[in-house]
Amino acid sequence: MVKVAPSLLAADLRVIGAEIERMAAAGADQLHFDVMDGSFVPNITFGSGICKAAARGPLPVDAHLMVEHPETQVENFAQAGAKIITIHAEAGGHLHRTLALIREHGCLAGLALNPGTSPDCLRYLLPSLDLVLVMTVNPGFGGQKMIPECLDKIAEIRAMLDRAGSKAMLEVDGGANTVTAAEMMRRGADVIVAGSALFGADDAKAFISSLRASWRQLHPEENA
Ligand code: DX5
Ligand code: ZN
């Protein structure tokens, strides 16, 4: 079954705790926690202090590090209680080492690819990965429209993971709504990040149920 990861960026930040509880009650699986450093991307968001507070809530934290030097942040976010730490393929030269460091800290290791980045970079890293994050917008801001050209990349990576027998999750991030998420799942996504569309929905539970219904249509074997 698809996992749904609400992006905290789109929450009402005056009441973060209540927003996380609201998403858990709506059926979300993990909390997508966008960390931006104002250098890798133009925006600055949350640090490990907020992560620590968020991790005390009911959802496991999936930390998406949009930072220039992720190796300097792994320990901070692991100690802050993140369960998944995802770094960017475009940040830093020692991806293999940083992914190993994430696992050494007891977290699941993820690698994110910007829209312009080829899946080729995954080739020698597959055994080091518990998650691949395909960006379907340019990172830095919530509320953008999905870039449709990125959909083919999801399918390409799905095939790559299956061929390698990898059990890594395939997470997709950017512009997900009930229509675009179905397109992402059709290409093989099994974790959907949803920010503005989910937090802005009149009924968050209905939004998540709709994603699960699309998943069941695409995977009738799981209904048996
Ligand atoms: C963008 C972030 C996303 C973003 C998703 O840089 O990585 O996680 O918050 O938000 P929506 O769903 O609004 O595109
Ligand atoms: Zn993100």
Image (cartoon, helix red, strand yellow):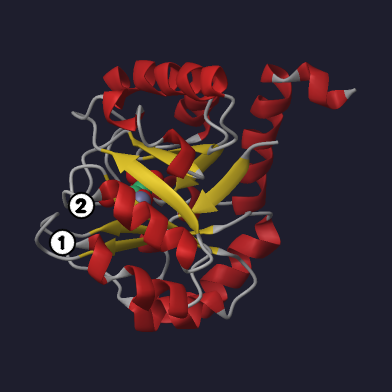
Residue appearing at x 9%, y 60% in the figure: 39
Give how far across and how far down residue 152 sits, in percent: 37, 15
Give how far across and how far down residue 126 sits, in percent: 44, 34
Question: Quick check: 51 left or right of 42?
Answer: right
120 or 193: nearer the viewer? 120
Q: Is mark 1 within 8 Å of ligand 1?
A: yes
Mark 2: which secondary structure? loop
69 or 205: nearer the viewer? 69
Q: Residues within 10 Å of mark 1 (few under 14, many from 20)?
A: some
* Picture layout, residue 213 above or below residue 94: above
Residue appearing at x 26%, y 37% in the figure: 137
Q: Is mark 2 within 8 Å of ligand 1?
A: yes
121 or 220: nearer the viewer? 121
Question: What residue does disc 2 label?
Answer: 140
Give how far across and how far down residue 37 sits, in percent: 17, 66
Question: What residue does disc 1 label?
Answer: 43
Q: Residues within 10 Å of mark 2 (few under 14, many from 20)?
A: some
Ranked by sequence position, the earlier of labels 2 and 1 is 1
Q: Is residue 187 visible?
A: no
Residue appearing at x 41%, y 16% in the figure: 156
Which residue is at the far right? 224
Q: Quadrant of the N terminus?
A: top right
- Name the residue type under label 2: Gly
203 or 27: nearer the viewer? 27
Question: Quick check: 149 left or right of 51?
Answer: left
Give how far across and how far down residue 184 sits, in percent: 48, 26
Q: Are marks 2 and 1 in contact (CB under 8 Å)?
A: yes
Q: Quadrant of the C terminus?
A: top right
